[in-house]
Image: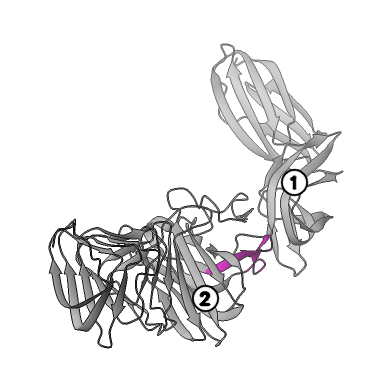
Amino acid sequence: MQKSRYFVMAVLWLSALSLGAQGLINNGARIVLTNGSAVVVDGATGNYTSQAGGLITNSTTGGSMYVAGNWVNNAGNAGFSNDGATVLLNGAAQNIGGSASTTFFNLSLLGTGSKTLGINTTVGGISTLTGVLSLGTRPLVLNSFTLNVSNPNGAAITNTTGYIQSETNLATNPSIVSWQMGTTTGAHVYPFGTAAAVLIPFTFNKVPATSATVSVATRSTAASNNNPWATGVTHMYDPTLAQDGSDEAVIDRWWEINSTAAITANLTFSYRGNTENTLVPAFNTGTLGAQYWATGAWLPDNAVLGSGTGVTAGVGSVTANGVSIAAAYTPWVLSSQLAPLPVEWLTVTGNCANNHALLRWSTATEQNNDYFTIERSTNGTSWTAIGNVQGAGNSSMINNYQFIDPLPLPTINYYRIRQTDFNGSSSASSILMVSPCVASGDVVDAFAGNGNIFVNISAAFAQDYRITLYDSRGRLVSEQQFAVQPGANRFELEGNVPATGVYMVSVVSTAGERISKKLFVSKE
């Protein structure tokens, strides 16, 4: 049969038909598959093209249609008038496209290469809704289109090593599997995978018999640090790093779930450990959980749903049981227990002003933020609370705060701002280091005697001093550090001054106290 000849009959009854590489054009006919008949459209260019209202009808005994080329539906209808037929794509790289969406009953992917959508497509049938998508070993690339699964049963998609590729890295991922689950309960496995043939399935285990259609899309952002963020998301925060934590505290993969009804389900998320787990140690091998974005905040507040141990090789997973799914579009991530948190810090700064330490900080958003506690330390390890500032509670605007420490320590001061939620959960900002704002009041002097140099320090508090000695040509002779205690301290430079001559001694404290003095040392 030549490709230039069209079917023009109203009905074409087939028990067996084999076509070569010329392909098959259905120009308005009704092709009836009867008594287990098979139509074989073979060859790399063996496309099936339906146009002008062409249809395929299945008789009581199911028939099959093997297509080695592309499936093109330009007929202005769903392609089939009833359920029962099985279409087998057994070529190399093949497309399912055309100007009209096809509704397959059974669709099996065979042959080699990827099968790619060029239009929104349905598998599972028109009325009986018992058809199956059999992936076998082949990838089905969604290519920014939606695969509708009309069979509500959890076995409506089968595979061995085949997978569905939803990897379109856009803020709203258009590569979607939309499963019309109806009132069916139990596990519905979305066999997602990547272009590298790594299976990362997502399981939606539906608990109640509430009728719902659940649409899921997923994408890796391993090459772009979780960017772009999913539509609607405005912040992430990592308290360990005190900065955006979308790369260091969150798995580099997004899941977008949209349910038509509020239901409860057990969710299992999967990710690639070697490329998508970029969490900083030890979070990368610690406990991970699921968080979702809703109403301008990450929920659950300062917590996660479910748990799983982070992996840095192979495929990792997190299961969250008893999750309440809203009837809405909801982005999900897998996060360390500490991030993201409900305060997004913009800036935290500190400096001296009129012998006081002035601390300023700004937040971009706040969720359930009760108050801030200002903490001070002499070493950046042990902290003491020195004051509180009321938080904004809930805010999506930039808020600016400040706190004055009227009596900073005469040493280097370390500060941090601790944020506390209404529920008592807290997190801390990055650590600030502020130089001494007032002189220590120490009295320092140096003198020569008995062929050596001595330093006297009357100290107000304990701290360290560094004493440096240079010869008349500016060459370093010695550098020593001494621990000073409150009260009178006397130090003799360790080692002998090498020769008679003029020397410059410099004495500097950690609080900024400094003297420089020229001395003549006689070795006679």
Horizontal placement of 404 versus 41: left or right?
right
Q: CA distance from mark 2 to mark 1?
A: 42 Å
- Image depth: mark 2 or mark 1 in front: 2
Q: How far from the left and from the top, in percent, is residue 258?
A: 55, 69
User: Pointer 2: residues within 10 angstroms few (<14), some, or many (20+)?
Assistant: some
Q: Position of residue 417 (x, y in %)?
A: 74, 52
**What is the residue that sits farthest to the front in this orientation?**
9
Asked whether, in this view, residue 83 is left or right of residue 280, the answer is left
Residue 213 marker: 2
> Is the magenta region chiefly helix, strand or loop?
strand
- Point out the stretch of residues depicted in magenta: 289-303
Of 453 and 347, nearer the camera is 347
Badge 1 local density, few (<14 within 10 Å), some, or many (20+)? some
Location of residue 218 in the rendering, given as x and y in whole percent from the top left corner: 46, 62
Image quadrant where residue 326 sits: bottom right
Display coloring: one colour
Task: Specify whether residue 30 is in view.
Answer: yes
Q: What is the three-letter code of the residue carrying label 2? A: Thr
Query: How far from the left and from the top, in percent, is residue 321?
Result: 54, 80
Seen at 28% across and 88% down, the residue is 60
Q: Nearer the viewer, residue 247 or 174?
A: 174
Residue 252 is tagged as none
Q: Earlier in the sequence, mark 2 or mark 1?
A: 2
Quarter of the image with the C terminus in it: top right
**Tags 2 and 1 in contact by the CB under 8 Å rule?**
no
Residue at 73% across, 56% down: 366
Q: At numbered mark 1, what does the secondary structure look like: helix, strand or loop? A: strand
Residue in the picture at 64% in, 53% down: 234
